[in-house]
Structures are given as structure tokens and as C-alpha cells.
Amino acid sequence: MQHDAVTERRNNIAPIPFEADAPHLKIVGELPRELNGTLYRNGPNPQFDSPGAHWFVGDGMLHAFHLENGRASYRNRWVRTPKWLAEHDAGRALFGGFGRKLPDAPANLTDGGVANTNIIFHAGKLLALEEAHPPTEIEPGTLATCGYHNYQGRVAGSFTAHPKVDPVTGELVFFGYNAAGPLTPALSYGSIDASGKATRFERFEAPYASMVHDFIVTANHVLFPILPITGSMERAMSGRPPYAWEPDKGAYVGVMKRNGTAKDIVWFRSEACYVFHVMNAWEDGDRIVAHVMQFEEAPLFPHPDGRPTDPEKSRARHCRWTFDLSGNTDRFQQTYLDDLTGEFPRIDDRRAGLKSRHGWYACANPRLPMFGALSGIVHVDGNGRRLGHYLLPAGDTISEPVFVERSKDAPEGDGWLLAVVWRARENRSDLAVFNATDIEAGPAALVQLGHRVPDGFHGNWVGAA
């Protein structure tokens, strides 16, 4: 990973080497007065270069944009995981990719966690998440790291970066892959009630060891996608890719009733594909309908022999999955809803697991040769039809758009989208605030930073108490 200025200006992946506080940020336009709270974002920001380390495994850095009465401030902090602290004390990298210790690392060092993927607020706790370790609790104001949170010892092992909060019950539903150890086919599944108490935790076997980044939750069902980015300890031990694209394994999705058990899972099958992120899903009579961002072939990971996947097929598009629960077939249907490349889908979270009429995702500019650079936002209805489409100036890129409702009882979709934008020519970032149902009008307000926020993964809004 190069950190020179030329590379940084060509893309926005290189880390920033500092923590900062900016108490009074310049605002272009006018911030809505109803926007009172904090947008927390998380993403990889390696403290030290590590040979051969995948971008996915950089140390987590949190970025907090606090908005209050039309004013804005910013703070960023690394998540001080055991790995970060050990490397900080050593003054150098001690881990390579996916928790692998470097040969000259101290023998007693075991924890390679990075807490770099998502940040959520549930039951009064702010939690930084990545999928190989328990949640890391964060102090909301200072962004200080409080340590792992394991729900009074009731939750163990890996914990997804994409838990789902039921908008009706306030319950947090989660899973973990590699639940019986690295590169194993076991999954865990559990739930935390609205007060923060673990109410369920169990494990079961999937058809094969897979990288399971996200899952699907409806009012009465949980769905576990087992898709062919496969994990193999044999490959890892022989120096080949621990995770690789093996389409011959096919795609499986396990459907379980939320009040049932893992013994009752029904496995549906389909053609090989990969999905990092789910937009939403709901029940429709005897069917479950899910909207996902589907790749024909996995990006970022090679075939088992190290060959890259086909870039033309390694792009995600908005896709509908349909599951027939009446027992007529064990195949699920995949229907692409658009041909536009996109990722990081979001909804009005008050409709999570329920039929929704609005969704948004970051998209690539089809007119630019920069494949993979997300440079716009798409607004869609509940059937995937485009309602709006906004593109940034050439070269600029955008993060996941986060929806914030105007008020707790506002209609679905009535509110704003918050997204961090990298301004390529100036090599710095803005927080862009859009009217969620009129994104084509462009940002209603821009909060301007003097430095850049590197490309990251996920974020969430926490309203003022």
C-alpha cells in the first residue's frame, strides 16, 4: 500500500496518519436545524504498513461529525484494539492479513482484531464492529475505546458487522461466521433484547466455510447466505489465498423462523453469486422478498490458484431474491432490477424487515473509466425503480449514504441522506446533506473538512438524546 501524494490523489484508500479535532467547521448552504446528533463512520486506516495486508484488514478509525443547531464539528480516533495497542507500543506492524501474525511478532500476541467495519448504537451502547471479533464499546463523546463487550459473557467468538435492529421490538439480531474457529463452516446466531440483554446464542453448520458478510432478517424469519467466497485452512497453511472464489460450490441461503431453531433451517439453492450487502427484505404471503446488491463473480478475492476474477462480472447490481416458502421448490429466484454498478444500500431503518417504499445506494458513474469508484447516489422505490439519480463532479467519490428521518413520526423517506464525499482536486472531504426524496437537487448543505476521510465502510446516525 503506497502512501505517496500522487497515489492519494488518484484514489482515497491510503490512510491518514493523525487524529484530529475540528470544533468549528465551515458550512456551505444551511444545515437543517432538525439535524441534531452525530454521524459516526468507520473504516480501515492502518497505523503501520504491513506487507501483503488486504485493505479489508486495516485498523479501524472512527470519524464523528456532530451536528447541532446548524453548526458542525468533527473528531476522528483510531479504535484502540489489542492489536493497535501492541503495534503502537512496538512502533511497527505485528500482523499481516486476516489476523496472521508476522514471523517476528512476539509469541504471546494472539489478537489481530481491527474493529474497522461498522459502528452502531443499541441499548445505550456505541459499538465498533468487524466480523471476526466481539463488538468493541466506544465512548460516544470522546471516541475513547472501552474494550470488548460480550454481553455478560453470553456471546462468544465472531460477531457480524451487520446486525439488524427490529424496528418494532428493538431487538438486535446477529450472527457470526467461522464460529468454530478460523475458516470453519460453523455459524452462530443470537439476539440481544432492547435493554441490552443476550436472550439467545447458538451454533450450527453451514454447507461449507464461506465469508458471510451480511444476512437477511424479516419480521418472522432469518436468512443466512452461504455464497462461494470460500474459506480453506488447507489453502492458508500452504500460502495460497485463505479466501477464494469457488463458483462450483453454488449459492445456498438457509431460511429459519425467528422463533424456531437451527434444526429447522430450510436450505435454498441458486446459481453462484456473491453479495456483500442487503438493502432490505420482507414477507409477502408465502414468499420472502429480499433486495440485495449482487455480484456475478466476487470482487477483491481471487480464484483458489490466485487468478483474478473477471472485472466485468465483479460489479454489484441491485437484485431481487425471491423465496417460495410453500415447499414447491428449493431454488430461489434472482432478478436484476438495474444495470447500474452500485454498493452500500440503505433504507429508512424504521422499515427494516418490513415492506419498504424507499431505498438508496452509492453508484458508479457509467460515463467514467474509473470502475469501482462510487461517485453518485441512486434513490429507488420498493420495486427497484429509480426515483432519482445524482452524480458528483468527475473524480470525486462518495461513501455509503445514511438516512436520517425528519422526526420519529415522519412518513417513510421523509428526511435527509448524509454521505462523506472526497473532493479529488482538493484532496479533502465534505459531509454532504441531501434531501432524501430529492437527491437530484444535489446537496442542501456541505460541511467542509480541511483533510480527507479515507474511503471506509459503514456508518450510522445517533440522534441527540
Image: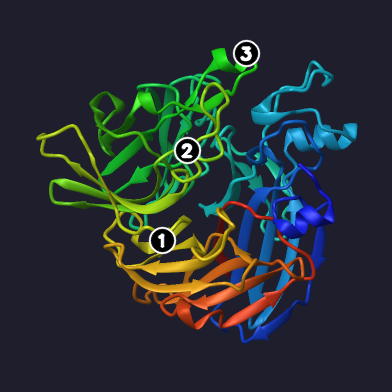
> What is the secondary structure assignment of the residue under circle 1?
helix
In the picture, the quarter occupied by the N terminus is top right
Q: Is residue 200 left or right of residue 19?
A: left
Find residue 183 and name its label. Answer: none
Label located before the other in sequence (1 or 3) = 3
> What is the secondary structure assignment of the residue under circle 3?
helix
Q: Position of residue 410 (x, y in %)?
A: 38, 77
Residue 325 picture quarter:
top left
Is residue 374 shown above or below 226?
A: below
Mark 1 or 2: in front is 2
Q: CA distance from mark 2 to mark 3?
A: 22 Å
Residue linked to disc 1:
349
Find residue 298 and name its label. Answer: 2
In the picture, the quarter occupied by the C terminus is bottom right
Is residue 429 shown above or below 330?
A: below
Is residue 121 shown above or below 47?
A: below
Q: Amino acid at mark 1?
A: Asp
Residue linked to disc 3:
237
Q: Position of residue 146 (x, y in %)?
A: 70, 44
Q: Is residue 248 left or right of residue 139?
A: left
Q: Position of residue 68 (x, y in %)?
A: 64, 77
> What is the secondary structure assignment of the residue under circle 2?
loop
Label located before the other in sequence (1 or 2) = 2
Say how the picture is coloured. Answer: rainbow
- Mark 3 packing: few (<14 Cα in 10 Å), some, or many (20+)? few
